[in-house]
Image (cartoon, helix red, strand yellow):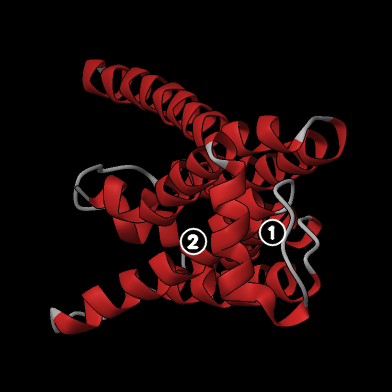
Amino acid sequence: MKVLFDLFPVILFFLAYTGAKHAPETASAVASSLLGAAGAVGPEQAPILLATAVAIVATFGQVGWVLLRGRKVDNMLWISLAIIVVMGGATLLLRDPIFIKWKPTVLYWAFAVVLLFADRVLKRNLIRSMMQDQLPLPEAIWNRLNLSWVIFFVAMGVANLYVAYHYSESAWVNFKLFGGIGLMVVFVVVQGLMLSRFLESEQRK
């Protein structure tokens, strides 16, 4: 459930974009009614603009849901909200999709900076804080895990920009959902295999 909750805005972004692509005239009319202050929205612009608006609303919905349940909003969710409001807002205001295309990269790199800053400056390993109750690992392994997540997020940001600038808008939207999830799953599985081998070797000692 946590994974679905985290992916909620991304999934809705994909569904809104795909639906608008299949009904461009309707999407154009809806987008024009919502964003028409600066002029009518053409069928070619409507899908990305509607999807961006949906993602912004969905992220606000995430924060609202957590607050209504009386729980603390994770710092990462606050960061995600700030980035989608700024980058998504710029896309809607200027009608330029490049800002929303940069949003995943800014978010990935923000995660990398947070992990690195917490580790090097605050002397707090956030990966260990999240996983230490499930995994008894030595300090050196926790440091490697933290660094591996930093590198992964940096690489994901680069990959997003590569797809955004070298492929079509539709290809980027597909990569945003399926590529992002797929690469994340592969990374987690590889990490799991490495950790299981380490734990097995430690048990043999």
Does residue 104 lie above or below 155 as drawn?
Answer: below
Name the image quarter holding residue 24: top right
Image mark count: 2
Q: Which residue is mark 1?
A: 100
**In this rendering, position of residue 24 left or right of residue 145:** right
Identity of the residue furthest to the left in this view = 69
The residue pinned by badge 2 equals 55
Foreground residue, 199 or 72?
72
Label 1 is placed on what type of residue? Ile
Q: CA distance from mark 1 to mark 2?
A: 10 Å
Of residues 67 and 15, the one drawn nearer to the viewer in this rendering = 15
* Dot 2: element: helix
Is residue 108 in sight in this rendering? no
Q: What residue lies at 74% left-to-right and 55% top-to-bottom?
A: 42
Evaluate if marks 1 and 2 touch, with contact meaning CB atoms under 8 Å apart.
yes
Residue at horizontal 68%, vertical 29%? 171
> Label 2 is placed on what type of residue?
Ala
Q: Is residue 75 left or right of residue 24?
A: left
- Visible in this render: residue 27? yes
Residue 68 or residue 29, whichever sits in front: 29
Q: In the picture provided, is 136 more to the left or to the right than 156?
A: left
- Expressed as whole percent of the image width and height from the top left, the position of residue 169 reads 73, 38
* Residue 130 percent coordinates (x, y): 31, 57
Residue occupying image coordinates x 64% and y 67%: 32
